[in-house]
Amino acid sequence: MASVTGTGESVSAASLRRLPSYRQYLKVLQGMGREVVSCSHIGQALKLNPTQVRKDLAVTGIVGRPKVGYETEALIEAIESFLGWNNLNQAFLVGVGSMGTALLGYDQFNHYGLKIVAAFDNNPSLIGQKIHGHEVLSLDKLTDLAARMHVLVGILTVPAQAAQSVANLMIFGGIRAIWNFAPAPIEVPEGMVVQTEDLFSGFAVLSSRLAEVMGIRRKAGVNADANRR
């Protein structure tokens, strides 16, 4: 299982993926005026084992009160601090196609510690255009600008065949973390961070579960017909 190092212990990728869900739910509770929350309450709401919730929250360093729980605001702050969301990370996006355009238009990244400050492409028909308030820059400016602006995050939304070459440009510019939406793996030097999003894998899980559900329903329908006979 993939893991990262944090707070002196190994933190699983699954735990990291759950923390934003906790934060989102806690924000809802905060808006409702709820000042204290327990792991049991969070687990019940999110359909998770309370013990797992407690283990996940422990990596943030926060300690709850026995039989009481956590202060909602303090828990939100602990999660945001652990994930680095209380510091705004500037990012460059490369590849202003359908996926890149959609990400440029998403206006909630700032709430999660991410700000896309520039977009790049090698398509002459796109260079110079403004997409969701971002002027599309020529790809050959990426390395120099990344170095001068000390940008640490790169978002990759290019075709598979261009993924590695663009990743190399990011590396040369000093970018340390790449969020890879390209349908291809990329190789990076040791010490860099890569998060690859495989949309087709996600859909495979969805379609498989749908087939399972529909199969159960069809089977139930057949049994019902048999009973009526």
Image: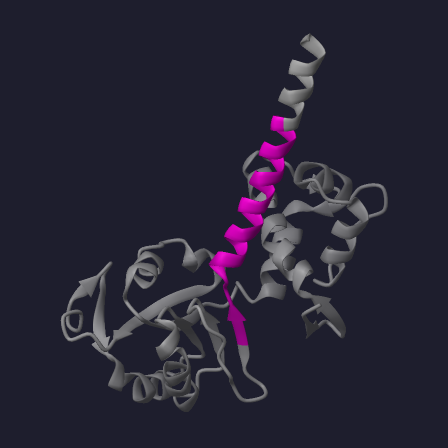
Q: Where is residue 35 shown, x and y percent of the image?
A: 66, 40
How many numbered circles are shown?
Answer: 0
Query: Start and end of the magenta stretch?
Result: 194-218
Taking the view exactly as shown, the residue that stands out farthest to the top is 228
Does any portion of residue 153 appear in the rendered image?
yes
In the picture, which quadrant includes the C terminus?
top right
138 or 60: nearer the viewer:
138
Taking the view exactly as shown, the residue that stands out farthest to the right is 66
Q: Is 130 on the left or on the right of 106, as rendered?
A: left
Q: At 70% across and 40% down in the image, what residue appears?
A: 47
Q: Where is residue 175 shown, x and y percent of the image?
A: 44, 83
Q: Is 209 on the left or on the right of 43, as rendered?
A: left
In the picture, residue 19 is in which quadrant?
bottom right
- Reply yes or no: does residue 213 show up in magenta: yes
Q: At 60% across and 42% down in the image, what residue appears?
A: 209
Does any portion of residue 30 appear in the rendered image?
no
Query: Where 228 sits versus 53, above or below?
Result: above
1 or 150: nearer the viewer:
1
Q: Where is residue 172 shown, x and y percent of the image?
A: 40, 91
Q: At 65% across and 27% down in the image, what residue appears?
A: 219
Q: How is the image coloured?
A: one colour
26 or 165: nearer the viewer:
165
Q: Where is residue 10 shown, x and y percent of the image?
A: 75, 71
Q: Is 102 on the left or on the right of 50, as rendered?
A: left
Q: Main secondary structure of the magenta part?
A: helix
In the picture, which quadrant includes the N terminus?
bottom right
Query: Where 174 sits versus 20, above or below?
Result: below
223 or 48: nearer the viewer:
223
In the picture, residue 61 is in which quadrant?
bottom right
Q: At 15% across and 72% down in the image, what residue appears?
A: 128
- Reply yes or no: does residue 125 show up in magenta: no
